[in-house]
Amino acid sequence: MTAQQIFFFGILVFAIIGLQRGWRRELISLVFAMIGAFLLIPGNGTFQLFLARLLGAIGVLISGSQPAPPGPLPSWAALAAFAVVLGLGYYVSTKAFPKPATPAERIIGVVPAIITGAIVLDYLFQYFTNVTGSPTVNLSLPTPDPTSFVPILFVIALVSVVVALITSRMRKTPAKK
């Protein structure tokens, strides 16, 4: 399988999940995926900086001295932390919102699910290639360019919104007495 085939298969899986969960739940999951990808992206020191500042503040409050900054986060730990953040997002969204009641809510759920899938798959592709471009795990897959998929994702989102609007306008005729 090529990287593009894997990407589209992953997007299809996320779209089906979004269709089942609805747009409210998927929107919360999207926020958690964005936060996790931003903080834990390989080669980026955002989480390291956050962790160093947090430990420094705790050290100053407790002992009055600042501890040494932590070492670099292993790549497997970043992947595990990303999985925990995604799982937490799915758990919170399930507890915060009920199941979707209308077909329109389900169909619109495809849009944030596709975006979440693109973020997760991009994170995984970046995880499997380090900063220098050589793979950390030898899969021999070229990293796809997410910008080339924007028109396709836009068309899918547009079709989903149109179908959701059509289904929300359709009303059942009341039963005659």
Image (tube, grey):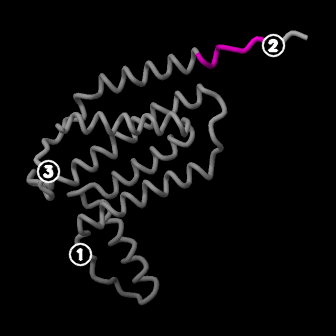
Residue shown at the point (40%, 35%) measured from the top left: 114
Give the labeled residue for mark 2: 174
- First in sequence: mark 1 or mark 3? 1
Q: Which of marks 1 and 3 is in front?
A: 3
Q: In this view, does 15 lie to the left or right of 165?
A: left
What quarter of the picture does the N terminus occupy?
Answer: top left
- First in sequence: mark 2 or mark 3? 3
* Residue 151 drawn above or below residue 122: above
Give the labeled residue for mark 3: 139
Q: Can you give x and y, in whole percent of width and height, for residue 54 in the image?
A: 40, 72
Give the labeled residue for mark 1: 71
The three-letter code of the residue at mark 3 reads: Leu
Name the secondary structure under disc 2.
Answer: loop
Residue shown at the point (36%, 23%) measured from the top left: 154
Residue stretch rendered in magenta on the structure? 167-173
Q: Is residue 157 magenta?
A: no
The three-letter code of the residue at mark 2 reads: Pro
